[in-house]
Amino acid sequence: MRFTTYSKYVAGMADQVNLQALLDQLGDFLLQSGFAGNPWWGGPEDSDAGHSLDDLRQAILQALMESGQLTPDMLKALRGESTGDDAKDAQTLKDLADLLDKIVQRLVDEGYLKLDGPPSQPGSANQTASGQERDAARTVQFDLTEKGADFLGYKTLKELLGALGKSAVGAHETTSLATSNEAEAASRQYEFGDVLNLDVPATLSSAIARHGLQVPIELDYKDLMVVQSEYRSSAATVLMLDCSHSMILYGEDRFTPAKKVALALAHLIRTQYPGDSIRVVLFHDTAEEIPVAALANVKVGPYHTNTAEGLALARRILVGQRKDMKQIVMITDGKPSALTLPNGKIYVNSAGLDPTIIKATFAEVAACRRSNIMINTFMLARDRQLVEFVKQVSRICRGKAYFANPMTLGQFLLMDFLKGKTRRVA
């Protein structure tokens, strides 16, 4: 007879690491915006900065150190402190390399990251004696998967809602009434086409009032009463992200926080408002739409800000949407400085507010208003000329303007979005 002996499973350090907590710590590293080549939203193969497997290991190591999850021996080895036993020191470094490789593999296995090449064998991450292995680690590129980006969006959203004191959100409310599963108004007589959500007490009361109390109760068509609720409208949103160079210059990264907020908004709409839609438009020298799933990979692109082209593209997208509410959420930090001419050439002028560029931009804003599209602008700068420009945009389209910084952008944008979700629209 064959016997099997089972022993207690003891989890290793790599298995004990909370991957979601680690991803949260790595958020800024994984979403770093840098400068990219064309396209500005391509994968890691389009930009080598910070996307190698070796860079990822270093970032994980830093996160583990900050969270105090490394053993004392590993910390001593990292500090270059020798125990006097060369064999033990070498084994400690090998254990540390194994730990980092296993964590990377767990992130890949759980679907948070993907690699564009096979990861090196465990133990190779810190084998400094082999320069070839370290070079190989630099050639393997990694990238956030859609699951990983969605998780970072969820964490950002959770932090923002916590800061706002919100735990749940509703849907768009309007002044129109319709039949549904939630009673929020007085019952009314059933009409053909209504959801047959009967108000039983009102229906029976109507029948008894007409025929008297008798068994069985005689019901007529006109006795049927249905409960009413507020009609919930749907919304189509285009998120316009300025990815010109100014968003990451002057010693402040404004683009990475904007990306995190965009991911949070996309997660909110996808999970809480399934009837809504969100599309993403990047604008720089020109403008293009990108898939929402590519948000995590977006990097700063060309130099100038073609606001008119971005608005025109956003308007074309929204005109084709069959939603009750249509809005553009524009995040920018600079004045319009580029314009697409009728012949397709790009006219640029970074000195002040160019009258030709401004006129074309205001014309697109007016076109959005004629199409019943609201523009809400989130400006990450406070230059006097920019303030006047944004105020004029708001006056033309009857939208709202917010002057925020990277720290408050998320709260302002989320407060505005949730307020729009609960306000009544005619």
Image (cartoon, grey):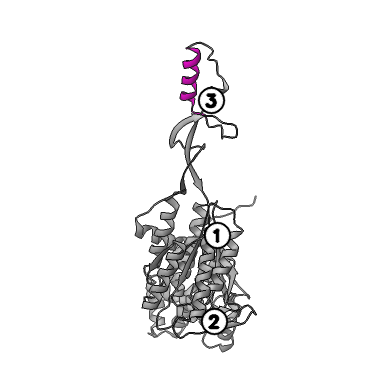
Q: Is residue 358 visible?
A: yes
The kind of secondary structure the magenta stretch mainly shows is: helix
Name the element at disc 2: loop
Foreground tag (2 vs 1):
1
Q: Which residue is mark 2?
A: 302
**Under tag 1, what secondary structure?**
loop
Percent coordinates x, y for residue 267 in the rendering: 50, 59
Q: CA distance from mark 2 to mark 3?
A: 64 Å
How many C-alpha atoms fall within 10 Å of the one at disc 2: few (<14), some, or many (≥20)? Answer: some
Count of numbered badges drawn on the protein: 3
Return the residue nearer the eye: 226 or 76.
226
Q: Report which quarter residue 136 is drawn in.
A: bottom right
Identify the amino acid type marked 1: Ser
Q: Earlier in the sequence, mark 2 or mark 3?
A: 3
Q: Which of the two discs, 2 and 3, sits closer to the camera?
A: 3
Label 2 – label 1 distance at C-alpha: 30 Å
**Camera-side residue of 282 and 274:** 282
Residue underneath mark 1 = 371
Task: Name the residue beneath numbered marker 3.
Answer: 224
Please report whichever mark, 2 or 1, sits nearer to the chain's N-terminal start.
2
Measured in 3D between alpha carbons, the distance from the residue under mark 1 to the one under mark 3, in whole angstroms, is 41 Å
- Magenta region: which residues? 198-212
Q: x%, y% of residue 121? A: 59, 76
Q: How packed is label 3: few (under 14 Cα within 10 Å), some, or many (20 or more)?
A: many
Magenta span includes 211: yes
The residue at the far top in this view is 214
19 w.r.t. 184: above or below: below
Query: Which amino acid does the dot numbered 2 rest on?
Result: Pro
